[in-house]
Image (cartoon, rainbow, N blue to C red):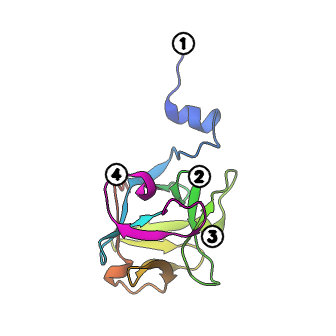
């Protein structure tokens, strides 16, 4: 039958699938200062939430893709310099939007927004923003299943 693997199927037959096939982490993203997890709050756009970690996936299931997107299904985390809030936006299928790109510094446990070079920060445990990196606990994150 010359069967192909699932990764081949996603790349060649269904590239618009909301599941990333080239992820570096898959699971919850927990802030080390607040012990809270990023959460979509069931929304399709607007500011990303931060809630008590429940370990059940769903609204707290994220993937860091090889392109640098932090995704929950077809939604990407995004930020702009206008208000520095971290928001949910629909991901671009064909190419990456620079507002959607992050890198994870595994040594310092920081999520860095590539465009602004600011760190994702749990602000007062209520909202998620990007701010200048300062190595504080509210800027340190554990990515479940992270593979460098």
Q: CA distance from mark 1 to mark 4?
A: 37 Å
Q: Which element carries disc 2, helix, strand or loop?
A: loop
- Upstream in the sequence, badge 2 or badge 4? 4
In this rendering, position of residue 117 left or right of residue 91: left
Instruction: Judge whether residue 4 is colored magenta.
Output: no
- Do the numbered discs 4 and 3 sit on residues whose CB atoms are within 8 Å? no
- Which residue in the structure is indicated by mark 4? 56
Question: Per the image, is 49 magenta?
Answer: yes
Determine the residue positioned at 66% across, 64% down. Answer: 97
The residue pinned by badge 2 equals: 74
Q: Earlier in the sequence, mark 3 or mark 1?
A: 1
Q: Label 4: how many residues lie within 10 Å, few (<14), some (14-19) or many (20+)? A: few
Residue 99: mark in rendering: 3
Q: Which label's residue is closer to the chain start, 1 or 4?
A: 1
Q: Secondary structure at mark 1?
A: loop
Per the rendered image, the range of residues in magenta is 40-62
Q: Quadrant of residue 110?
A: bottom left
Which mark is in front, 3 or 2? 2
Q: Residues within 10 Å of mark 1 (few under 14, many from 20)?
A: few
Q: Which of 28 and 105 lies nearest the eye of the viewer? A: 28
Q: Residue furthest right?
A: 94
């Amino acid at each position: 039958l010359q069967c192909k693997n699932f990764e081949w199927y996603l790349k060649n037959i269904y590239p618009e699938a909301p599941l990333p096939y080239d992820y570096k982490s898959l699971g919850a993203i927990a802030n080390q200062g607040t012990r809270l997890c990023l959460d979509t709050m069931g929304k399709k756009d607007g500011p990303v939430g931060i809630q008590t970690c429940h370990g059940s996936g769903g609204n707290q299931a994220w993937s860091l893709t090889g392109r640098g997107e932090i995704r929950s299904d077809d939604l990407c985390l995004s930020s702009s310099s206008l208000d520095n809030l971290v928001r949910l936006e629909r991901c671009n299928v064909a190419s990456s939007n620079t507002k959607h790109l992050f890198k994870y510094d595994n040594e310092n446990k920081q999520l860095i927004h590539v465009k602004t070079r600011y760190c994702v920060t749990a602000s007062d445990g209520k909202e998620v923003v990007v701010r200048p990196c300062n190595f504080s606990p509210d800027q340190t994150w554990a990515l479940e299943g992270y593979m460098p």
